[in-house]
């Protein structure tokens, strides 16, 4: 248990969890007052998942990059478990609301958007580091939720705006799945890039 506690603290998971839970809770409480329906729409689901994924993306590296790449620990397994638990926890958090009046659904969209954005965040962390892992998911989400984007029968639109396509849209599901798998594999195998030593030194 001590290892788990130290791991969670070194990854700043408590703060990330507070942000993720806060985003879900705030939307859940406020949605009925700003919408005629009780079901959170796909655009807002995407925004909430984005906020949570970006917050949790900061936990994908610790303070010591050399330790995260050392052979003395099974880091690939730990990275895979970390990412899978992150996605599963976020999905569970959103699905808890289905027993209330205001809710995040349908399930297909919640799972698809969460898996895709978490995978995209992991890809960003692998390429640019955890501190910049937000760039890719934020960019894609902002493009998808633009007013002129919407559900479409065109393949390029279904891929480009996969986040806001209806449940059961094959191209959107495939796109999200590819992002999720690519992010999981890349992060598991490589982890975050090593930062210059000056960036990892404690402040004095």
Image (tube, rainbow, N blue to C red):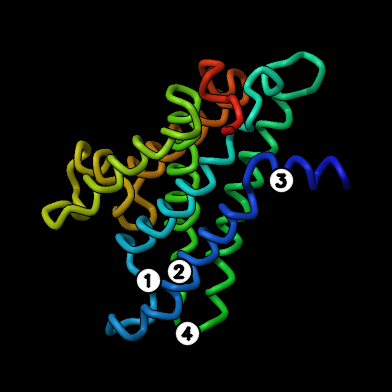
Position of 170 relative to 100 (above/below): above
Real-space Cα distance between discs 4 and 3? 33 Å
> How packed is label 3: few (under 14 Cα within 10 Å), some, or many (20 or more)?
some
Q: Nearer the viewer, residue 145 or 126?
A: 126
Real-space Cα distance between discs 1 and 3? 31 Å
**Seen in the image, is 64 located left or right of residue 193?**
right
Q: Which residue is mark 2?
A: 104
Say whether disc 3 or disc 2 marks the residue closer to the N-terminus.
3
Looking at the rendered structure, the secondary structure element under dot 4 is loop
**Seen in the image, is 152 located left or right of residue 51?**
left
Quadrant of the image occupied by residue 116: top left
Task: Pinpoint residue 138: horizontal percent, then vertical percent.
Answer: 33, 44
Judge depth for marks 3 and 2 and give the one in front. 3
Q: Are marks 2 and 1 in contact (CB under 8 Å)?
A: yes
Judge depth for marks 1 and 3 and give the one in front. 3
Residue farthest along the right direction in this orientation: 1
**Seen in the image, is 116 located left or right of residue 84?**
left
Task: Pinpoint residue 106: horizontal percent, then vertical percent.
Answer: 44, 65
Quadrant of the image occupied by residue 31: bottom left
Q: Which residue is mark 4?
A: 101
Residue drawn at (44%, 73%) of the image = 26
Residue drawn at (59%, 25%) of the image = 201
Q: Which residue is mark 1?
A: 40
Real-space Cα distance between discs 2 and 4? 10 Å
Q: Which residue is mark 3?
A: 8
Say whether disc 1 or disc 4 marks the residue closer to the N-terminus.
1
Q: Nearer the viewer, residue 63 or 145?
A: 63
Looking at the rendered structure, the secondary structure element under dot 3 is helix
Real-space Cα distance between discs 2 and 1? 5 Å
Say whether disc 2 or disc 1 marks the residue closer to the N-terminus.
1
Task: Pinpoint residue 149: horizontal percent, then vertical percent.
Answer: 16, 51
Real-space Cα distance between discs 3 and 2? 27 Å
């Amino acid at each position: 248990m001590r290892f788990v506690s130290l791991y969670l603290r070194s990854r700043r998971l408590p703060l990330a969890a507070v942000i993720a839970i806060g985003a879900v809770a705030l939307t859940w409480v406020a949605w009925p007052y700003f919408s005629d329906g009780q079901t959170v729409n796909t655009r807002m689901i995407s925004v909430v998942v984005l906020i949570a994924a970006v917050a949790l993306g900061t936990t994908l590296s610790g303070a010591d990059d050399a330790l995260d790449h050392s052979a003395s620990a099974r880091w690939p397994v730990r990275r895979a478990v970390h990412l899978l638990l992150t996605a599963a926890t976020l999905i569970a958090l959103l699905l808890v609301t289905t027993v209330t009046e205001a809710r995040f659904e349908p399930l297909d969209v919640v799972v698809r958007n969460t898996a895709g954005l978490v995978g995209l965040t992991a890809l960003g962390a692998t390429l640019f580091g955890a501190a910049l892992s937000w760039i890719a998911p934020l960019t894609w989400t902002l493009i998808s939720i633009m007013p002129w984007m919407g559900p479409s029968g065109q393949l390029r639109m279904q891929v480009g705006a996969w986040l806001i396509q209806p449940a059961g849209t094959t191209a959107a599901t495939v796109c999200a799945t590819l992002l999720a798998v690519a992010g999981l594999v890349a992060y598991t195998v490589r982890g975050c890039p090593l930062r210059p030593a000056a960036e990892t030194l404690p402040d004095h």
